[in-house]
């Protein structure tokens, strides 16, 4: 078990395990972005974290994804954001809209901060998807799931401060822009609500024709290889009394908690 490794060191670890007749090598990080990978698996059959080409975007819509602080690759994203958000060659400055419960550093850098209760990002994303379907704004057809989306939106409570007219305008800009992207699944978020938000964000990107453009699965991020919670539990459960576990550059006992770690290990 190791922290995320790539390149030569990852190959050395594979050969080290193989020398003992084992293929059990697991890359573990405290934050695995499992909802994001699961969402992409559900929608596209690709359990991956894609490369986001933010520098090419005319509009970024972030559903509480703090990409300037901690989300996926903040150093790279900060550089990309600086490129897309600055004045260059007298062009109109591109924009970022942040939808979430708190004024994080990423939200403070947004052109518009739409404050919603915790967990309500999913509802805003659903309403945006419904608007795109109703007004036929998208580049790809999602009519097959229109009833499902309508039912979910109908059951959702009204959100104070989120005007329908503003969402319609946002949807038009998101779909008509030369390039745009929707981001979701904050660091450390887990559970059905986080996954549903990531699924709707993936559908927004698909509806606007951003897959293969600003959302590039052909050059996925190395974090795609980090084990999810289920994989970690199965890995630990596979250990027998005669096995030796080597742990490199990670501390699952601390990040998962003593009781949770011990319960996953047999015996």
Image (cartoon, rainbow, N blue to C red):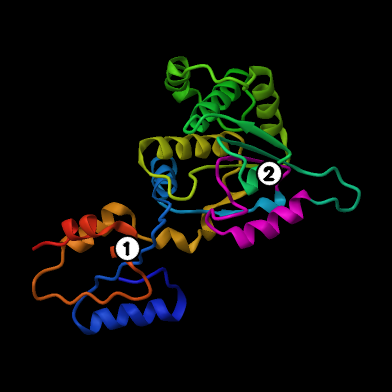
Q: Is residue 126 above or below residue 239?
A: above
The residue shown at (49%, 46%) is 186
User: How far from the left and from the top, in percent, is residue 128?
Assistant: 58, 26
The residue shown at (26%, 77%) is 246
On the image, which quarter does residue 175 sit in? Answer: top right
On the image, which quarter does residue 65 sit in? Answer: top right
The residue shown at (64%, 19%) is 163
Image quarter where the C terminus lies is bottom left
Residue 75: in magenta span: yes
Mark drawn on residue 254? 1
Which is nearer the eye, 208 or 122?
122
Chain part drawn in magenta:
57-85
User: How far from the left and from the top, in percent, is residue 206?
Assistant: 55, 38
Residue 72: in magenta span: yes
User: How far from the left and from the top, in percent, is residue 12?
Assistant: 36, 82
> What crowding class fits label 1: few (fewer than 14 Cα within 10 Å), some (14-19), or many (20 or more)?
few
Image quarter where the N terminus lies is bottom left
Instruction: Identify the residue under disc 2.
Output: 108
Cα separation between marks 1 and 2: 32 Å
Total marks in image: 2
User: How far from the left and from the top, in percent, is residue 184?
Assistant: 52, 42
Q: Is residue 55 above or below residue 63?
A: below
The residue shown at (46%, 19%) is 156
């Amino acid at each position: 078990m190791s922290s995320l490794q790539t390149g030569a060191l990852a190959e050395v670890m594979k050969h080290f395990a193989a020398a003992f007749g084992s293929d059990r090598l697991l890359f573990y990080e405290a934050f695995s972005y499992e909802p994001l990978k699961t969402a992409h698996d559900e929608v596209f059959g690709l359990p991956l974290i894609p490369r986001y080409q933010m520098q090419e975007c005319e509009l970024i819509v972030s559903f509480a994804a703090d990409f300037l602080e901690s989300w996926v690759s903040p150093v790279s994203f900060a550089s990309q954001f600086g490129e897309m958000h600055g004045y260059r060659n007298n062009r109109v400055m591109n924009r970022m809209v942040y939808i979430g419960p708190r004024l994080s550093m990423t939200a403070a850098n947004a052109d518009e901060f739409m404050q919603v209760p915790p967990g309500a990002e999913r509802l805003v994303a659903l309403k945006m998807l419904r608007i795109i379907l109703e007004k036929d704004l998208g580049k790809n057809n999602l009519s097959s799931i229109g009833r499902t989306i309508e039912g979910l939106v109908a059951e959702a409570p009204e959100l104070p401060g989120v005007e329908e007219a503003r969402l319609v305008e946002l949807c038009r800009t998101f779909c008509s822009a030369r390039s745009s992207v929707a981001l979701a699944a904050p660091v450390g978020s887990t559970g059905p609500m986080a996954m549903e938000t990531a699924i709707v964000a993936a559908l927004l990107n698909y509806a606007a024709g951003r897959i293969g453009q600003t959302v590039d699965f052909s050059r996925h991020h190395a974090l795609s290889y980090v084990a999810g919670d289920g994989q970690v539990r199965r890995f630990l459960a596979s250990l027998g009394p005669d096995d030796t576990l080597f742990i490199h550059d990670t501390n699952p006992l601390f990040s998962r908690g003593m009781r949770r770690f011990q319960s996953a290990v047999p015996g």
